[in-house]
Image: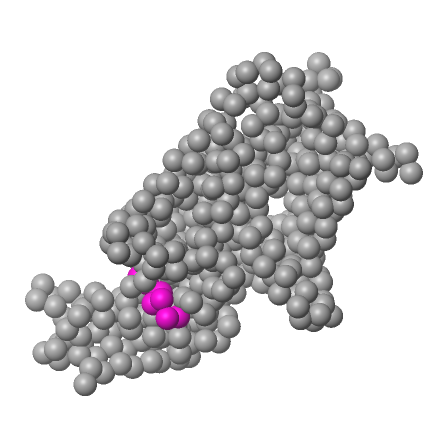
Amino acid sequence: MKKGIIIFLLASHLFLFFMGTSFFNFDRVPEKLQALVIYYLSITGGHSYNFFSPDIPQQVLVTCTVTDSNGSLFDSHGKFHMEHFGSTENTYELRSDYFFQSISNNGDYEAAGEVAIHHCLKKYPKAKAIEVVFSRYSAPDIVDFKEGHGRGSLNHFYTKNYTRE
Amino acid sequence: MSKLKTFFTANISGSGWLVTLRVGTAVALICKIASEYRYIDQLYGSDGFIPVDLAVYSQNPHIPAIPGIFHYVSRFCSEHHFLQAFFICQLIFAISLLAGYMTRFSALVCWLMMVIVFNSSHLTSYGFDAILLTLLFYSFIFPVGYDLSMDNRSKAKVTQRDDSLIHIFQKTIQIHVCLIYLVNGISKIDGSLWTNGLGLWDAINQPQFHSLLTPFFQKLFMIPFLPGLLGTSVLIIEIAYPFMIWVRQTRKAIFILIILLHILIAVVMGLWLFALAMIVLNAVAFGHVMRREKAQET
């Protein structure tokens, strides 16, 4: 009896995981049950694993240009006030990069822009203006690259501006 | 029917996989904490990278989150000290899990704390976090303290254990792993960039995956047919894995291929933690099956 209950629970667990995959039509599930399933998947890690399926998306690069209170783009050391998001050199950069990738894939550029501005204001508290530019990176054409003149390109698609009043 | 029963009930790998699950999960969790500790304020603080006003929209309101918990203890300490205490506490229990001391309780604490962390950082999470949460969940519900643990030093405890369900527990993880690869492999069929290799070419050129080996891989992709071959291989390996892993004659080959795939992902894309978690999952599911088969042959 005990063994049967355990087997039933484990089978249910696997079925709930299957419900969280892209194969399962979640819309058919009643709303209240959906909430329960999502809750269970949230605590067991049973989300739909992407694994770059169906394709590896183009990377979204975010560049912030900061103008200080004197109207300058450079600080006192001659360093350009610019923040980039798009590397994975450490955990913080990896996770901030993932934020911009996932939120951009959802089309919520407004929220992403707010986050970028928030980050810049923390780093440059006296900033007068911040321009956040979202671009999609396109890899160089493989044939052009082979011939020696292939370059990656950035396709800008969204800009958000902040000006201190 | 009897073959089906044998499939689910035959204990072909013993209980060594439970040790791999416990140790592998604890190591993955320790690596995560170690890599993030210096950034805990930026990643989990209310004034961190994601403002708390935005973060709260992505959180499940029925699961605790770090800012919510801090609200109750804010009169006793600063947020920075709270975050330090939280992750140090998780680290201590991860080490305890690694050693197999108060195993189930340690696994429970690690799992619950990871649930809180995952809910607090949905917007910055990726595949590794979900896989680690799964591993921690399994570490809690399965008897991972059975072997090679501080808890198991007592002979009296050894005689009390019940091994009758261990094969069922492992079968659960095996089916889970197969589902992961099958779903993602079939999903990739829709993506033409995988079959012609351009998806991989795009990936290695992306700034987020740039490494010292990028120029080498760029040159490698100049070899005719190689991009398409590599992309199609990834697809085939993922789809074939759930079937070939059950056949004794092909198990070793597909296992090695999937491990190599994850190592390549780590090397090319820098996703070391993700690769570690997936390798642990594979080793837990099928690593000991092959080890036992090899031992039986000799």
How far across and down, in percent of the image, does residue A47 sit?
59, 57
Q: Is residue B262 above or below residue A97?
A: above
| Residue nearest the observer in this picture, B37 or A133 | B37
| Residue drawn at point x = 37 percent, y = 40 percent | B89
Q: Is residue A156 visible?
A: yes
| Residue drawn at point x = 59 percent, y = 14 percent | B155
How far across and down, in percent of the image, does residue A45 sit?
56, 52
The number of numbered discs placed on residues in the rendered structure image is 0
Extreme residue toward the bottom, this view: A165
Task: Give the quadrant of the N terminus of chain B.
Answer: top right
| Residue drawn at point x = 51 percent, y = 31 percent | B103
Residue A66 part of the magenta-drawn span:
no
| Residue drawn at point x = 66 percent, y = 41 percent | B173
How far across and down, in percent of the image, does residue B76 sit?
26, 52
Task: Give the quadrant of the C terminus of chain B.
Answer: top right
Q: Is residue B245 visible?
A: no
| Residue nearest the observer in this picture, A36 or A19 | A36
| Residue nearest the observer in this picture, B201 or A51 | A51
Residue B52 part of the magenta-drawn span:
yes
What span is colored magenta in the figure?
B48-54
How far across and down, in percent of the image, does residue A101 sit?
45, 65
Q: Is residue B212 above or below residue B159?
A: below
Where, by quadrant of the figure, is residue B54 drawn?
A: bottom left
